[in-house]
Image: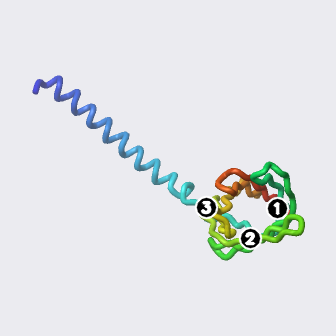
Amino acid sequence: MTAIRFRKRKKTMMRRSFFSALSIAGATFLAPQILAADEAIAGSYSVQGRNVEGQIYQGLATVQQDGSFVNFEWRTGSQVVSGAGSIDGRVVTVDWGSEHPVVYVVMADGTLHGTWADGLALDKLTPQ
């Protein structure tokens, strides 16, 4: 190998090592943000949503939380539905006895934006 090719190869390897170290350092500093603690969501909410048929509904919901475990109760009209699930960071998954769970995302303002019926219906919970 010629001296010029050797120097170019050495520079390339040094750059790769530098960028690899930089990536590891960046991941170390970002990891706490990625692995954020579960959100606190216990409380009362007003409910607005749209079911699979496209009909709009509204009501009230109550959320109880024990660590990463949650219990929900939705009251819409004369119907009362309950479910239990878990919260992982900002994602809440609730089994309510249907084939597909309700999946919410906790927004920065404390609202829960969710889908149910495999994403065909929408649900929004606003803290009271």
Residue at image coords 73%, 54%: 113
The kind of secondary structure element at disc 3 is loop
Q: From the viewer's perspective, is residue 2 above or below residue 124?
A: above
Q: Image quarter for residue 69?
A: bottom right
Ranked by sequence position, the earlier of labels 1 and 2 is 2
The label on residue 89 is 3
The label on residue 72 is 2
Q: Nearer the viewer, mark 1 or mark 2?
A: 2
Going by the numbered disc 2, the residue's amino acid type is: Phe
Q: Nearer the viewer, mark 3 or mark 2?
A: 2
The label on residue 127 is 1
The kind of secondary structure element at disc 2 is strand
Going by the numbered disc 3, the residue's amino acid type is: Gly
Query: Label 1: how many residues lie within 10 Å, few (<14), some (14-19) or many (20+)?
Result: some
Q: From the viewer's perspective, is residue 35 above or below residue 78?
A: above
Give the x, y percent position of residue 107: 72, 54
Give the x, y percent position of residue 22: 41, 44
Ranked by sequence position, the earlier of labels 1 and 3 is 3
Residue at image coords 46%, 47%: 26
Going by the numbered disc 1, the residue's amino acid type is: Pro
Give the x, y percent position of residue 8: 23, 27
Query: Label 2: how many residues lie within 10 Å, few (<14), some (14-19) or many (20+)?
Result: many
